[in-house]
Amino acid sequence: MALVWVYGTLRRGESNHGVLRDCAYLGQWWSPPVFYLVDLGDYPGIVSGQQSVLGELYVVDDLTLALLDELEEVPHEYSRERLMTPWGEACYYHYKMEATGLAAIASGDWRCRFVC
């Protein structure tokens, strides 16, 4: 079992949440200000920066973690990294491609990428 922190299309109500539908949801959490949330069109990415990002924490099994790695195209487009949360150390997906020129989502919340 592992903890996973998700910040985009894997969140509740988003297009890829089905992968996590049977996993235990622990809650929402704002990261420390160490990221930038960037808009990649149909999905977001996070890169190193100075912004807090809103995400959700889940408990996942090894099979689900492997499915998430496949969805996130690890190790090509994203890398699976770790960060400390109030629930313990969690995995998250860090965007690996060039982010220069990408639009940042100023709110730090993928759901508020248009208006909040």
Image (spheres, grey):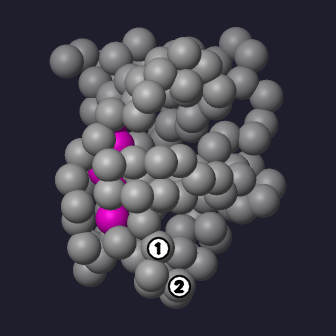
Q: Which segment is the magenta one?
A: 54-58
Residue 70 coordinates in the image, percent (x, y)? 64, 70
Residue 1 coordinates in the image, percent (x, y)? 45, 81
The residue mark sitting in front, 2 or 1, is 1
Give me the residue at 48% from left, 57% from top: 89
Mark 2 vs mark 1, CA separation in Å: 8 Å
Question: Which residue is under mark 2?
Answer: 62
Q: Amino acid at mark 2?
A: Asp
N-term-proximal mark, 2 vs 1: 1
Of 76 and 61, the residue lying toward us: 61
Give me the residue at 53% from left, 75% from top: 65
Q: Quadrant of residue 69?
A: bottom right
107 lies above or below 15:
above
Residue 57 coordinates in the image, percent (x, y)? 33, 56
109 lies above or below 116:
below
The chief SS type of the magenta part is strand
Q: Quadrant of the image for the C terminus?
A: top left
Query: What numbered label is drawn on residue 2?
Result: 1
**Callout 2–callout 1 Cβ contact below 8 Å:** yes
Q: Residues within 10 Å of mark 2 (few under 14, many from 20)?
A: few
Judge from the rendering whether residue 26 lies leftward or rightward of residue 20; answer left or right: left
Residue 62 visible in this rendered orientation of the protein: yes
Residue 115 coordinates in the image, percent (x, y)? 24, 16
